Amino acid sequence: MKKILTLFILPIFLIGCSSENEGLYYSNEASFDANTTGNYYEPIAGGDNYNEIVENPFINTADEHISTFSIDADGASYANVRRFLQQDNQLPVKDAVRTEELINYFDLDYEFNEAQHPIDLNGEVSECPWNEDNKLIRIGIKGEPIAGELPPSNFVFLIDVSGSMSSADKLELLKEGFNLFVDEMDAADRVAIVTYAGSAGVVLQSTPGTQKQIIRNAINGLGSGGSTAGAEGIITAYEIAQANLIPDGNNRIIIGTDGDFNVGPSSQDELVELIEEKRDLGIFITVLGVGRGNLNDGALEQIANNGNGTYEYIDNLKQLQKVFIYDYDKFYTVAKDVKVQVEFNPANVEAYRLIGYENRVLENEDFEDDTKDAGEIGANQNITALYEIVPTGNVDFRTVPTFAIDFRYKEPDSDVSVPLNLEIYDEGNVFAQSTDFMKFTASVASFSLLLRDSEYKGTSSYNDVIQWLDASNLSDPHGFKQEFRLLIQKAESL
């Protein structure tokens, strides 16, 4: 099926990032979150681990006119950035800032009008607000909302109860979240609970959602202590999920941990290899990162990326509500291995740059390779990607597409991809004429570039970001967009 939209332009591209972790951050000051949980947090000695991000450069279209990447539905980086700003009163380290995760944290209310596919597409081109000589392209993807009752679910909670999880912002916060989750379960749903410290243990066999008090008792009885045998816990969780697999249902493991693995296979490469062996079982994963001081963000993000999963960071009670209540439908995957391939027209585009998605870049030949893993999208979820482009100044730019976008996705239970495409034309609009979606996502992207002190931040300032944000008018039922405005002001003050 082909969609043709009339829109604007912009450039961006990707380059792979290092898979090595570096302990980049440790705050030795305790902090207090007065706005949410009311807990006093004492950091653990050590350092948080983040994978290095090498920003995508501009690519000359004459050298390579095709750009290919996997979508990324994670939102962890935004919540972690918020923790740095709100709780730790400091700017985040650069490699904690993944631009695509900041953008995709927010619900943008993209419309879904697709009758034949579980994803719908939209896009536009406008002037780039931080470089008036360039243009910005927005590519939007919307996951199909689930009409009527949700399909039955087979959940496994895999909870880290090692000694490093003893602080209030770790295991106790997760326990609050899993209790909220139980409230959302239907009678046809099931959940088992696996814990891991020095070894893995089954706290609760798969139990129907009708027995909520039994499930809550198992959650509330959890305590922390010991070392961290994460790989053994992952193996046990998959075994239980397989034993209770619901054909045509929703089968998902939800992992809660700081990622401080130290028993058995524990390196990032070993854990990724383990999770890759499991991802074809029809079981999806959600990774929930918690805490600070020894947060292994790099490993947790890669476990999610390589295991048909998503990664969220939990910094406070409101974030728990977002993940477990407001965004509950996202636990239901509607399309997997979603890939995007953009072909730029050399007549209109001199160079391009993909903003973010550095560790989601694919080789062009991976696009049609159905064995190549890519990202998932949940029910009613939106994904956005931005390119900044250098236009050629072609006076006939409105008569030919600025670029063509091809998509491929698989149904959750299929191994064969389905193609879609979208063509976008540049109508020469200035940024002020763009949609609220463009204004908002551009403001988030610019905020990220400023936090990273990126060489691609252009002329933007925090004050500019606030002005672009205020020029948009999107639904904000839970106040997250208003909170974003406060974070911009906080970052400027730091």
Image (cartoon, helix red, strand yellow):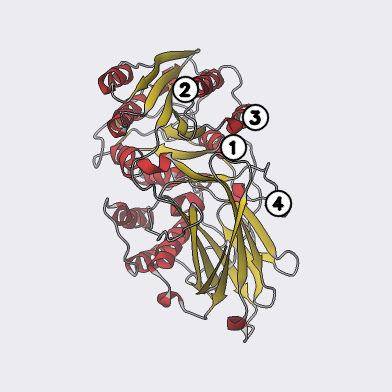
Residue at the spot of label 2:
244
Q: Residues within 10 Å of mark 4 (few under 14, many from 20)?
A: few
Indicate the secondary structure of the residue bearing disc 3.
helix
Residue 102 place in picture, x, y as percent: 45, 51
Q: Of marks 4 and 3, which one's residue comes earlier in the chain?
A: 3
Q: Within the image, what quadrant is residue 162 found in?
A: top left
Residue 23 place in picture, x, y as percent: 54, 34
Q: Of marks 4 and 1, which one's residue comes earlier in the chain?
A: 1
Residue at the spot of label 3:
273
Q: Amino acid at mark 4?
A: Glu
Q: Amino acid at mark 1?
A: Asn
Q: Is 395 placed left or right of 385 in the picture? A: right
Front-most of 355 and 25? 355
Instruction: Give how far apart the Cα atoms at labels 2 and 3 are.
Output: 24 Å
Q: Of marks 1 and 2, which one's residue comes earlier in the chain?
A: 2
Residue at the spot of label 4:
363
Residue at the spot of label 1:
306
Can you tell which of label 4 and label 2 is closer to the viewer? 2
Q: Is 399 placed left or right of 6 in the picture? A: right
Q: Of marks 1 and 3, which one's residue comes earlier in the chain?
A: 3
Front-most of 31 and 74? 74
Indicate the secondary structure of the residue bearing disc 1.
helix
Front-most of 17 and 429? 429
Indicate the secondary structure of the residue bearing disc 4.
loop
Q: Amino acid at mark 3?
A: Glu
Can you tell which of label 2 and label 3 is closer to the viewer? 2
Q: Residues within 10 Å of mark 1 (few under 14, many from 20)?
A: many
Please give the name of the residue rendered at 56% of the width and 35% of the height, measured from the top-left corner: 307
Q: Amino acid at mark 2?
A: Asn
Please give the name of the residue rendered at 45% of the width and 26% of the height, measured from the top-left corner: 45
Instruction: Give how far apart the Cα atoms at labels 1 and 2 are.
Output: 23 Å
